[in-house]
Structure formats: C-alpha cells, structure tokens
Amino acid sequence: MQTPVHCRPLATLTAPKPFLAQANGGRRGSGWHRERLCPSCAAAVQGPLQKNRLLFAAVEALFSFQPFFALAAKQAKNKIAQRGRDIGVDISAEVAALAAGADWEAELEAVQDASLAYPAYYTQPFHAYPAGNLCWEAALEVNSVARAVHAPVMDPSGRAMDPGGDAALRAAFSGRLRELMGEERAVSVRDIVDCGCATGLSTLELRRRFPDARSLTGVDLSPHFLAVARVTQRRRGHGAEEAGGAHEPLTFVHAAAEATGMPAASADLVTACLACHELPAAATREMLAEARRILRPGGAMAIMEMDPASAAFQRVFGNPFAYAAFKSTEPWLLEYAALDVPGALREAGFVSVRKESASPRHFTVVAFKPK
C-alpha cells in the first residue's frame, strides 16, 4: 500500500549555534541556514532538538575537538564490529580475503580521474574514518560493515538481527521504485545511472531488478570504493574480456553526482541509494539538477533514504547520547533531517513525485522528468 507523501515545505527548522558549522565551510559559530521541513519530520526532530537544545549544542561543539571525535569514532567502529560478530560477520577476516591478491595502487590508478577536484564536504572525517571515503580502510570494509549496520533495519523494533538485512533493504528499494515507476515505464529502462554507488552494492541490485538494461553506470567520488567495485566485478567473473570475464553492462565512473560528465538526456533512470544523508543539502540539490539534466524526457529519479519521521530516527533525536554516536559517523545528519526530499525534487523540476516506505526506517521516492 502506498503511503502518503508527508514531506511538504510547510515548516522550518533552525539549528542553534554552533550546530552544523560544516554547512559554512567548517567555520565555528557560523550557524546553519534554514531548511524547509515537512510537518511529520518537524514533529520528530524539532521537538527533541528544542527540548535538549543545550545538550545537542554541546555535542556539536565537542565534535570540533579532535580527541572527542576520535573517541566517538572508535566506539562506533567497535560497536559495528561487535554487531558483525553477533550476526556471524567477521569484518577483519572478510577484509583480509578481499584485500589479498590485488595490486590496489594499480587498481586505483586505473579508475581515478586525477584531475577531479574534491568538494570540501568530501574531505572531512566521515563514517568514523579520519580520511572519510578516501582511504583503503573504508573501501575494503564497507561491504561487510553494511551487513552489520543494516542487520536490524527490517525489524520495526530494531532488535532482531538479520545477516541479510542489507540485501533485503536494497531489494525493497528496487522493488518499490519499480512499483512507483509503473511496469509500463519500468520495462523501457535501458540506461541507468547510480549516484553514490560506493562499491556497487546498489548497482548490482539494480542489475538484478532490471536485467534487460543495456547499461548501468555507477558514479562515486571515491576512487578507492570504485577500485573495490571493479575488483569484485572481476571476481564475479564479469570483468573485462581481456581478463577472461563474461560481459556485464556495468561500468564505474570516478565523478561527483553533482557533475557526472555524462551527456544530457542519456539515461532513463537515475538513482541515489542512501546518498543524500551523506551530503550537505546544497550538494543534494545540485545532484538532483544534474539528474534532471542527464535524464531523457519521461525518465525517473529514484531515491532511497532514512526517514526522519520514523520511530528509529525519533529515538536518535530524542537522546543526545544516541545522537552523538550517530553523529560520529554521519556529519551531515542534522542537515539531512531538515531537507524536504520530495520538495527538493519538485524544486528541481521533477513531477509526479511518489513516495512509499522501503523499511520501517527508510523511504523510497520516485519522480519524473517532464516529457
């Protein structure tokens, strides 16, 4: 059953200083611009923020203190590793197996666009890694970490741990987007662009859901992640012909989702799976504008994201200590929570915006470029 689109630009949230100093280049005390927030998200986020205003402000200030960040990041990684062990995922062992037998510097050179200038938001500590996504540690761990982090996502209580939770979440996204597109539109999907593809987990799910697509392009800013995507592609037996692999219409491109470099009107479907919460709101809007540019008339933009109105999100924003743990891995969390995603799609020129739950704590939204 389709859920109502509750995100409409009817409320605003202003974070107290020094909240999200990153929004203005990392300058402390610069405050945070106002973002339009839907009524449901406002109730879930704005109330707890105001109730615990001083505590949240203290948490934000502490994150500018490097030893505090390092401690919080270490604790977050330890928790993820323990959850992995609880569901039978040995992250260290899986990383060692993945790393073995590859010339990673050569892989990096093969995929990296050396002329690419990284935006400032991408060069900050992120996901508990000091170098963010621009390091081998993050790239080699992400597939295993995703299974640990997403183990509870399909359980409304967040307590039941499922080793297949990550796969179930991605399958729910691809299934919902096909439903929201409508079968008639979905069968005409020939060319797909997956923004923020990381190591290709979301791109592979799109390949499974759209087996007749002639091309799938995964775009990401991290050449380390893309190198892992290419190596795992070859190990699946689908590498380049000279490597003895079978043909797979899946390529990976080192670029920003805001500036893919792809030709205008060259794609039928553009996706962003769990990417918006990792971006400042301005970058998300630029990504949507770029998606509209590269889509053919009638093409679709599909987003799967955390739902700020969900009970899980409310628990985080209702507890400054839970927020601190989340903040150590997601620096743009507050700015994302304030973003009206359906509204931003409309502002970017998309029409027929449709939204549905993908999990108890995630939504899928699909919108179309006018014909």
Image (cartoon, rainbow, N blue to C red):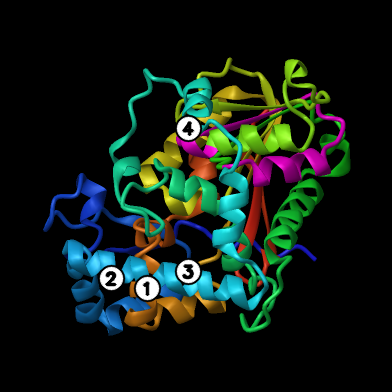
Report the magenta residues as a range: 199-225
- Looking at the image, is mark 2 or mark 3 earlier in the sequence? 3
Q: Is residue 61 above or below residue 118?
A: below
Residue behind mark 4: 223
Q: Is residue 178 magenta?
A: no
Discs 4, 1 touching: Cβ within 8 Å: no
At mark 2, the secondary structure is helix
Q: Residue at x 51, y 36 (%)?
A: 288
The disc at residue 71 is 2
* Mark 1, other Cα within 10 Å: few <14 / some 14–19 / many ≥20: some
Q: Residue at x 80, y 66 (%)?
A: 1
Residue behind mark 1: 75
Discs 2, 4 touching: Cβ within 8 Å: no
The disc at residue 247 is none
Any part of residue 282 in sight? yes
At mark 3, the secondary structure is helix
Discs 3, 4 touching: Cβ within 8 Å: no
Tell me how far mark 1 sits from mark 3, CA to CA. 28 Å
Residue type at mark 3 is Cys
* Mark 4, other Cα within 10 Å: few <14 / some 14–19 / many ≥20: many
At mark 4, the secondary structure is helix
